């Protein structure tokens, strides 16, 4: 790897020292690198959830269209109010305001 940090990859147990392979079950670049040298098929290590046939199966079912919005009950739950102190500051020089 370019950063000269070595990661141990165990393809049989689907583990990598970086943690992405076992936690997210998504192939990390270390797994791709291990599959490249002995010419292994990296697609066999993809979890079933991320395979296209599984995704297509999700959208195979028909979705009912939403009913008329006027028939929906009123929303009385708390509403989100943003924290102005956490707002990102724009880069560059501040704009002048006329008062």
Image (cartoon, grey):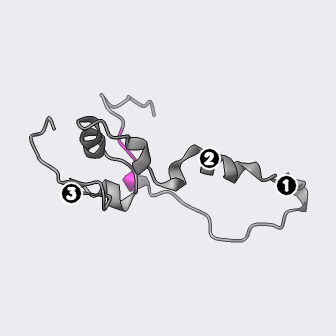
Q: Distance between the Cα atoms at labels 2 and 3?
A: 29 Å
Q: Quadrant of residue 76?
A: bottom right
45 up-or-down from 91: above or below: below
**Residue at x 29%, y 54% (from the top left corner):** 11
State the image coordinates of residue 8 (x, y, percent, origin top left): 17, 54
In space, the residues marked 3 and 1 are separated at their CA atoms by: 44 Å
Q: Earlier in the sequence, mark 3 or mark 1?
A: 3
Part of the protein shown in magenta = 85-89
* Helix, strand or loop at mark 2: helix
Q: Residue at x 16, y 38 (%)?
A: 1
Q: Is residue 85 left or right of residue 61?
A: left
Q: Nearer the viewer, mark 3 or mark 1?
A: 3
Question: Disc 1 marks which residue?
Answer: 64
- Identify the secondary structure beneath mark 3: loop
Q: Are marks 3 and 1 in contact (CB under 8 Å)?
A: no
Q: Picture coordinates of residue 67 (x, y %)?
A: 89, 56
Q: Main secondary structure of the magenta part?
A: loop
- N-terminal of the pair, mark 2 or mark 3, is 3
Mark sitting earlier along the chain (2/1):
2
Q: Residue at x 84, y 54 (%)?
A: 66
Task: Look at mark 3 in the image and give the residue it sits on.
Answer: 17
Residue 24: x %, y % from top left: 39, 57
- State how far apart marks 2 and 1 are (Cα): 22 Å
In the image, residue 40 sits, relative to residue 55, either above or below, namely above
Crowding at dot 2, Cα within 10 Å, few <14 / some 14-19 / many 20+, comes out as few
Label drawn at residue 51:
none
Q: Callout 1: 10 Å neighbours few (<14), some, many (20+)?
A: few
- On residue 53, the disc is 2
CB under 8 Å between discs 2 and 3:
no
Front in this rendered view, residue 39 or 82: 39
């Amino acid at each position: 790897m370019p950063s000269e940090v070595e990661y141990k990859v165990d393809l049989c147990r689907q583990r990598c020292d970086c943690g992405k392979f076992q936690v997210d079950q998504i192939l990390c670049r270390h797994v791709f690198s291990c599959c490249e040298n002995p010419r292994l098929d990296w697609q066999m290590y993809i979890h079933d959830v991320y395979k296209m046939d599984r995704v297509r199966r999700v959208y195979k079912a028909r979705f009912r269209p939403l009913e008329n919005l006027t028939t929906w009950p009123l929303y009385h739950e708390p509403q989100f109010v943003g924290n102005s102190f956490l707002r990102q500051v724009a880069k560059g020089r501040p704009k002048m305001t006329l008062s």
